[in-house]
Image (tube, rainbow, N blue to C red):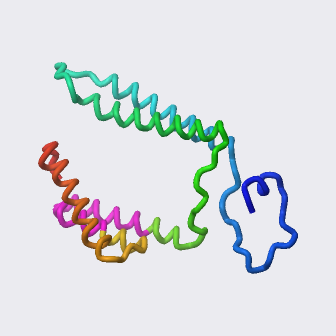
Amino acid sequence: MTDAEFSSGATSAAAPEDAPLDLTAPPAPTLEKTAAAVVLLFGVVMLAAGRAITLRNETGGIDPRWWPSAIAVGIIACGAWMAFNALTRRRGERDVDRVGSHGWVHVMATVAMTAVVLVLWQVGVSFLVLAPAYLIVLNWVYGLRNWKSLLLFPAIITAILYLVFQLLLKVPL
């Protein structure tokens, strides 16, 4: 059933019994516009708060106001894109997974694993041990079970995070 048929209430009288059931959400233009407005408002508030950070001395270039402002501009751009799509009634890609109980299992496993990692990190387990273990478990839970997703991806992501935060920004992990 297409979006136009769904929104007009048309149904197919000759729907075979073995046809897959369409479990995607119907169009909700009001909700899409509201979500876009909330994202835009959040971005504008974050930009104003980021620019209001007071500095002891102006350094020029990247300062404590830069990152919040850059993130806020990205949020505003996403909100503007959402608003454009909502106002022009453009539909996003509708190729989504079917509804099932496995989604809740994924969410609960993610929350549980995140809690375990945070507790272990507070106890003093090294980031270099926790980060790849966390990514390996999450990849396994979400069905990514080849060697690249279980070994290569966690190693690369952990290395990038370590290099950026520990060595470049001098933020202890």
Q: Which residues are magenta?
A: 109-135
Is residue 119 shown in magenta?
yes
Give the camera-side residue of 42 and 142.
142
Q: Residue at x 36, y 70 (%)?
A: 139
Q: Residue at x 38, y 67 (%)?
A: 112
Whether residue 101 sits left or right of residue 158 in the image: it is: right
x%, y% of residue 129? 19, 66
Is residue 83 shown in magenta?
no
Whether residue 132 sits left or right of residue 145 in the image: it is: left
Dominant secondary structure of the residues highlighted in magenta in the image: helix
x%, y% of residue 28? 69, 47
Give the camera-side residue of 41 and 1.
1
Q: Residue at x 33, y 34 (%)?
A: 68
Residue situated furthest top in the rendering: 57
Whether residue 9 sits left or right of residue 143 in the image: it is: right
Asked if residue 16 is positioned above or below residue 4 in the image, the reply reads below
Asked if residue 5 is positioned above or below residue 80 in the image, the reply reads below
Asked if residue 44 is positioned above or below residue 88 in the image, the reply reads above
